[in-house]
Image (spheres, grey):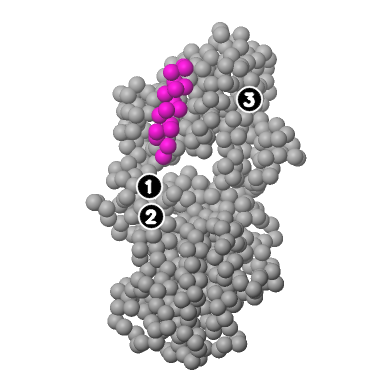
């Protein structure tokens, strides 16, 4: 995170005669609502200066690159700038210097293992400590050496302010890495958008996702993951110092803001970061190989909100993962480089409007048996949004926003309810011809305590047999929410409902946890399937996954089957089912079911993408 020298903020007219007392009495929630960490800390420093009527108040947090200062023009302190610089230097360069207790009115020279101002002054020096008791910074109140001594009451007031400083930091900084958190990062983005740069300049956002953390967690434990994440955070802070701001915005995700940076330059920075993380020497019992997928997006005040810019960077990161990980991908509004060539995303308001107005539509993609003709017709349920112009929006255009705004449980409920309602119209046909609809569930939904009851109620309401439904959860979701996943799956599986583990292999995890998950199908990640016909390594991986799955009694589904050659190779390996554009394109689910059950004899272009 680049160093920020917070400039003076003028006090507002609403302040009362005792702003320091007001600040001490503020609740945590009020403090957390002050916009931006700089403004919040500046309010603390301003209040100290005004109420105590001192020459200088300064808050120094070297580990976070923050110095907040307020000078009193009526009480000039000679060499105040030198005092601040020396304290910053002492805190930055020496790990041995400590300040374990408050000092007051001490004008003695600098002692070897402590911090004191070198210039003549009366001062109150208050340490700011981390949760681990380490010195994080100082709050310093200073007056001229000929000023009266600070009183115990003044000391008590300053000491009482320190917890508010800690609350501000806790609310805006990540505890593991010391980087700013997602909330503070969004504030930085909003400030960047509200600025008025030259119309030809803009900023860059980078979304970084560490590729192998799930495998590290499973093999070495969470402590190893935390050590790796901390080391990546230190590396990012160092390489971006003075040029960009970095935040931890998710479990394994980092966000980077680079001011006044063209998109192509952001792409170059992304590659520099990617190479640097690959070269990191992370050791925890054994060396940990680190790679990162990076999405780069433009941030411009003329066309975006913070929400859409973050979604664009995340989509580009998804593209990088789809290309095989350890990649950098760009998101361009006017160039079909990013995910599936889409040039737009739907914001939160549009998604909420679609939910209110029932403008979602169910699509389906057929899952075909590769080893003989199956007796059950199997479809994966997909979702589209019909926007106000009647255009169809794919999940890539709205899911990132929905995930960020925690709308996925509501969307998943819509899909389950409407899928069962649709099947209810074919109840007689279902009794004669078996069908299985696979419905995707998000991690947010899997952690929703009320969702299990909702599913049971919907099955009872519609009278659809549970055997007609299969829920798909991703490998990552299942691992991160293992206890909830096992309880949820076991309860519904006992009712006859089936489960599929999606994107297997994307987390580079082992087969060990499969013994714990009550699943029926395992979907092999498309990154291996795409090249199975031409790449011996991909072929071997698919064959190994297929063999192990069969040994566990699971059926395998290969996704992203995009050619006859891939399909033929999967058949020879023995994969049970295939799914992809080389087999069937998605189409409106109601029309697919009409054709399946003979409600219509001919459908033209039923499988239009």
Residue name at image x 56 percent, y 18 percent: 459
Q: Secondary structure at mark 1?
A: helix
Sequence-earlier tag: 3 or 2? 2
Residue name at image x 54 percent, y 57 percent: 28
Residue 406 image-quadrant placement: top right
Stretch in magenta? 480-496
How many other residues sit within 10 Å of disc 1, few (<14), some (14-19) or many (≥20)?
Answer: many
Q: Which residue is mark 2?
A: 229
Q: How far separated are the C-alphas under marks 3 and 2?
A: 41 Å
Q: Secondary structure at mark 2?
A: helix
Please check the rendered image and state whether residue 486 is part of the magenta-colored stretch, yes or no: yes
Q: Which residue is mark 3?
A: 418
Q: Residue 481 location in percent, x, y?
A: 42, 37
Q: Is residue 380 visible?
A: no
Name the disc covering residue 213, or none.
1
Dot 3 and dot 2 residues touching (CB under 8 Å): no
Q: Residue furthest right?
A: 389
Foreground: 444 or 365?
444
Sequence-earlier tag: 3 or 1? 1
């Amino acid at each position: 995170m680049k160093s920020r020298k917070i400039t003076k903020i003028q006090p507002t007219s609403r302040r009362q005669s005792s702003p320091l007392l007001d600040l001490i009495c503020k609740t945590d929630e009020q403090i957390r609502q002050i916009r931006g960490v700089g403004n919040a800390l500046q309010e603390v420093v301003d209040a100290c200066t005004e109420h105590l009527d001192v020459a200088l108040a300064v808050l120094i947090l070297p580990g976070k690159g923050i110095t907040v200062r307020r000078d009193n023009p009526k009480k000039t302190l000679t060499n105040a700038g030198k005092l601040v610089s020396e304290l910053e230097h002492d805190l930055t360069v020496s790990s041995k210097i400590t300040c374990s207790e408050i000092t007051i009115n001490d004008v003695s020279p600098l002692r070897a293992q402590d911090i004191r101002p070198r210039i003549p002054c009366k001062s109150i020096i208050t340490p700011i400590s981390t949760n681990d008791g380490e010195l994080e910074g100082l709050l310093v109140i200073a007056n001229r050496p000929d000023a009266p001594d600070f009183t115990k009451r003044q000391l008590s007031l300053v000491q009482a302010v320190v917890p508010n400083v800690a609350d501000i930091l806790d609310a805006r900084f990540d505890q593991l890495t010391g980087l700013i958190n997602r909330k503070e990062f969004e504030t930085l983005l909003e400030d960047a958008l509200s600025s008025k740069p030259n119309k030809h300049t803009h900023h860059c956002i980078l979304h970084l996702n560490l590729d192998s953390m799930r495998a590290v967690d499973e093999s070495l434990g969470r402590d190893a993951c935390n050590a790796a994440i901390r080391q990546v955070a230190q590396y990012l802070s160092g390489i971006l110092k003075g040029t960009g701001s970095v935040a931890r915005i998710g479990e394994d995700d980092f966000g980077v803001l680079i001011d006044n940076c063209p998109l192509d330059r952001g792409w170059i920075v992304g590659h520099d970061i990617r190479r640097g993380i690959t070269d990191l020497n992370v050791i925890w019992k054994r060396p940990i190989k680190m790679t990162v997928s990076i999405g780069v997006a433009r941030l411009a005040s003329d066309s975006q909100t913070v929400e859409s810019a973050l979604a664009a960077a995340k989509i580009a990161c998804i593209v990088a993962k789809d290309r095989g990980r350890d990649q950098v991908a760009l998101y361009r509004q006017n160039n079909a480089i990013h995910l599936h060539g889409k040039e737009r995303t739907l914001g939160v308001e549009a998604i909420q409007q679609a939910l209110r107005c029932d403008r979602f539509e169910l699509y389906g993609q057929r899952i075909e048996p590769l080893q003989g003709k199956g007796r059950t017709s199997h479809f994966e349920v997909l979702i589209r949004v019909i926007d106000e112009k009647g255009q169809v929006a794919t999940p890539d255009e709205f899911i990132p926003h929905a995930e960020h705004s925690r709308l996925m449980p509501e969307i998943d409920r819509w899909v389950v309810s409407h899928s069962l309602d649709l099947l209810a119209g074919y109840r007689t046909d279902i009794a004669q011809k078996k069908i299985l609809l696979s419905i995707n569930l998000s991690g947010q939904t899997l952690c929703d305590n009320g969702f299990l009851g909702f599913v049971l109620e919907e099955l009872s309401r519609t009278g659809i047999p549970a055997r007609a439904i299969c829920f798909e959860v991703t490998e990552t979701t299942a691992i991160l929410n293992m206890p909830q996943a096992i309880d949820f799956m076991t309860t519904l599986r006992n009712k006859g409902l089936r489960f599929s583990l999606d994107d297997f292999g994307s987390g580079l995890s082992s087969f060990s946890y499969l013994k714990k998950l009550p699943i029926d199908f395992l979907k092999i990640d498309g990154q291996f399937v795409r090249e199975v016909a031409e790449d011996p390594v991909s072929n071997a991986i698919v064959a190994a996954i297929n063999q192990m799955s069969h040994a566990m009694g699971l059926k395998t589904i290969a996704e992203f089957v995009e050619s006859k050659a891939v399909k033929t190779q999967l058949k020879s390996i023995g994969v049970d089912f295939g799914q992809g554009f080389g087999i069937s394109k998605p189409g409106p689910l109601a029309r697919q079911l009409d054709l399946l059950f003979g409600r219509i004899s001919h459908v033209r272009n039923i499988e239009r993408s």
